[in-house]
């Protein structure tokens, strides 16, 4: 396996950070902050630091994924997904690895501000997020290579991210926040589902045991549908069970986009077209999350 002469310009680093998928970092903080505002606990300082940490951890995870998929031989020349910077030769492997640890290290340093503000539990959560961000594709038992990637994304970019965002502002946990975290985690996981659906044949050849490899493409399509339905079950829960006002139902304005995406998942034959589906899935998560946050804020008080 060889690469061409590295040419790591700014555009290469932007592509390596995968900006089109950064909704998975932004939306958890957005929704968690909206819930803090609803409860009169808004702390913009803490929310801002949390958002910066979320972006750094996601970018660091993306860098690690770019590097470890290359060294493990998962990124082949017949890859149909977006261009990877290490395997394409635009960024040298050693440089990508250094960037991974530099980004994760910066996230740790910035996160210490939250530890000072909210206590040791934030340190534990932050360190675990950094470890699992690298362990997603690196280490002796990479999660993404052993069918655990979906669970990692659901927990760390959904449940943990939303609930911790609320905690660092209110300095207490909220069971009400847990339900919104389920919706966010479901939609973040769907980004990974499309990625795995697109790459299932290549992953099978390279020995990467994603859920698509273990259970087949149909299982991924069912997972995508189930996670979509889970997300849309949360606004009615807030409206009926938690007695939130009608604005909390605003995410249903995004329903046509989600219907379209599910149709695409079940009908697209050329998997190259799933690159666009992946972009739209991230955009749909952003739209749903912003509408949910707006609905929570609009009926606050």
Image (cartoon, rainbow, N blue to C red):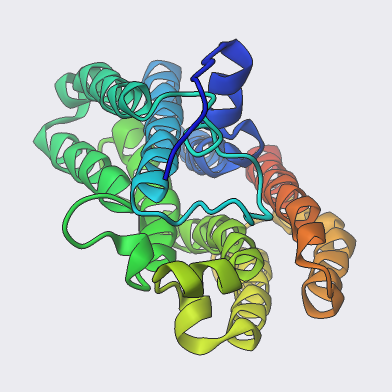
Quadrant of the frame with the C terminus? top right
* Residue 237 appearing in the image: no
Camera-side residue of 135 and 122: 135
274 to 130, vertically: above or below: below
Q: Is residue 166 above or below residue 116?
A: below
Which image quadrant for residue 74?
A: bottom left
Residue at the (68%, 78%) spot, across then down: 225
| x and y percentages locating residue 148 in the rendered image | 35, 69
Q: Nearer the viewer, residue 64 or 26?
A: 64
Which residue of the protein is positioned furthest toward the top in this rendering?
A: 9
Indicate the quadrant containing the N terminus: top left, top right, bottom left or bottom right: top left
Residue 243 picture location, percent across and down: 60, 63
What residue do we see at 41% from left, 24% from top? 92
Quadrant of the image occupied by residue 258: bottom right
One can see residue 190 in this view: yes
Q: With 133 as the anchor, is 268 left or right in this view?
A: right
Residue 144 in the image, given as x and y percentages of width and height: 37, 62
Q: Is residue 104 above or below residue 136?
A: above
Extreme residue toward the left, this view: 120
Residues 172 and 80: in front is 80
Q: Residue at x 64, y 42 (%)?
A: 293
Q: Is residue 260 left or right of residue 156?
A: right
Instruction: Give the residue at x 42% y 34%.
Output: 63
């Amino acid at each position: 396996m060889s690469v061409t002469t590295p040419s790591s310009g700014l555009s290469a680093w932007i592509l390596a950070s995968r900006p089109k998928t950064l909704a998975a970092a932004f939306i958890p903080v957005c929704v968690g902050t909206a819930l803090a505002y609803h409860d009169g606990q808004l702390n913009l300082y803490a929310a801002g630091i949390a958002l910066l940490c979320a972006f750094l951890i996601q970018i660091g995870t993306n860098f690690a994924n770019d590097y470890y998929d290359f060294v493990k031989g998962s990124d082949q020349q017949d890859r149909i997904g977006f261009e990877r910077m290490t395997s394409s030769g635009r960024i040298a492997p050693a440089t990508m690895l250094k960037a991974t640890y530099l980004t994760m290290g910066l996230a740790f340093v910035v996160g210490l501000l939250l530890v000072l503000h909210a206590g040791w539990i934030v340190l534990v959560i932050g360190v675990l997020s950094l470890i699992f961000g690298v362990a997603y594709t690196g280490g002796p038992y990479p999660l993404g290579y052993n069918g655990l990637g979906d669970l990692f994304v659901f927990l760390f970019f959904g449940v943990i991210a939303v609930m911790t965002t609320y905690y660092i502002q209110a300095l207490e946990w909220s069971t009400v926040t847990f339900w919104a975290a389920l919706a966010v985690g479901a939609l973040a996981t769907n980004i990974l589902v499309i990625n795995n659906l697109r790459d299932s044949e290549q992953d099978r050849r390279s020995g990467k045991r994603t859920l698509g490899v273990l259970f087949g493409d149909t299982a991924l399509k069912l997972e995508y549908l189930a996670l979509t339905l889970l997300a849309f079950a949360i606004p009615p829960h807030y409206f009926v069970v938690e007695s939130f006002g009608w604005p909390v139902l605003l995410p249903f304005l995004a329903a046509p986009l989600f219907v379209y995406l599910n149709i695409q998942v079940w009908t697209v034959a050329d998997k190259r077209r799933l690159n666009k589906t992946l972009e739209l899935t991230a955009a749909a998560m952003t739209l749903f999350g912003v509408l949910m946050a707006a609905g929570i804020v609009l009926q606050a008080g």
